[in-house]
Image: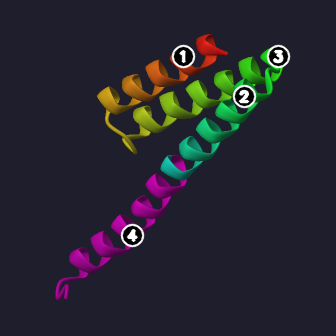
Amino acid sequence: MPNIKQQEKRVRSAARQRLENLRYRSSIKTLTKRLSAAVADGDAELAAAEHRELVHTIDRAAARGAIHRNTAARKKSSAARLLSSG
């Protein structure tokens, strides 16, 4: 338990940041599933749009520090492989 005012503030801000990071990670998972579904359906135009949105979200999450930059690169590479396979 924090017993200093600044520690209490850090606990509050860390909780807020944790939720924001969770939103980014969850969005990335959702967009990856949507890309996978678009590729499976064979809709190239939709798949390209989903890929673009996914890459944008991954870059944004990495810039904000929600995910590590190597993790971002790995996820983008995986998405590109998925897009090219369809």
Q: Residues within 10 Å of mark 4 (few under 14, many from 20)?
A: few
Sequence order check, earlier mark of 3 and 2: 2
**In the rendered structure, which amino acid carries the disc numbered 4?**
Ala
**Residue 65 at x, y percent in the picture:** 36, 41
Give yes or no for contact between labels 2 and 1 (Cβ–Cβ under 8 Å). no
Magenta segment: 1-24
Residue 64 falls in which quadrant of the image? top left
33 vs 72: above or below: below
**Residue 20 at x, y percent in the picture:** 49, 56
**Residue 10 at x, y percent in the picture:** 28, 69
Q: Which of the two marks, 4 or 2, is nearer to us in this view?
A: 2
Question: Would residue 3 appear left or right of 72 to someone viewing this image?
Answer: left
SS category of the residue bearing label 2? helix
Q: Observer-nearest residue: 18 or 32?
A: 32
SS category of the residue bearing label 1? helix
Question: Would residue 69 appear left or right of 82 to someone viewing this image?
Answer: left
Q: Residue at x 41, y 59 (%)?
A: 17
Kindly identify which residue carries mark 4. 15
Q: Residues within 10 Å of mark 2 (few under 14, many from 20)?
A: some
SS category of the residue bearing label 3? helix
Kindly identify which residue carries mark 2. 40
Sequence order check, earlier mark of 3 and 1: 3
